[in-house]
Amino acid sequence: MSITEIILKMPCWYFVIMILFSLYYAIRGLVEQMIMYGDSIRMSRAQKIIYAYIQEILFKVIITASGFIALLVANYMFSLVKAIDEIGVGTAIVLVFLIVWGATGVSGYLTYLIVSGKFPIVVK
């Protein structure tokens, strides 16, 4: 089964939650960028919108949606496994990756993890 078929079988409630979370994180990222790029940087309003705001919105929406899709694919892969003993090493690695990607994407930490290379709770 292809990824397209898996996504097309996505329940409506899951799609609605994915859109709501994506919009929430996009608005949250936009507010964060507005605070960060307030009046301290001398850019025109158009430059701020193009440089920071649009990029932030797209980044948050795409990363959050990819987290939901990763969890959906992981759920589908788990449903194909008949017993835990039948999971190969490659499948286990892919499942762990999908679960970590999905959990951090849905929780909003994946964008921070990608940009900084660490979780925000890690203290030096």
Image: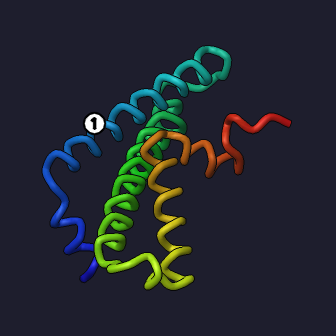
Which residue extends farthest right?
124
In the image, 43: left or right of 12?
Answer: right
**Residue at (48, 80) in percent of width and height:** 91
Determine which residue is flagged by label 1: 20
In the image, 58: left or right of 11?
Answer: right
Q: How is the image coloured?
A: rainbow
Q: Position of residue 21 (x, y in %)?
A: 34, 38
- Where disc 1 sits, the SS reads helix
Q: Quadrant of residue 106?
A: top left
Quadrant of the image containing the C terminus: top right
In the image, 21: left or right of 4?
Answer: right
| Residue 106 versus residue 37 in the image, above or below | below
Q: Position of residue 64 (x, y in %)?
A: 41, 47
**Residue at (35, 41) in percent of width and height:** 22
Which residue extends farthest top?
39
**Residue at (33, 64) in percent of width and height:** 75
Amino acid type shown at disc 1: Leu
Crowding at label 1, few (<14), some or many (≥20) Cα neighbours within 10 Å?
some
**Residue at (53, 39) in percent of width and height:** 51
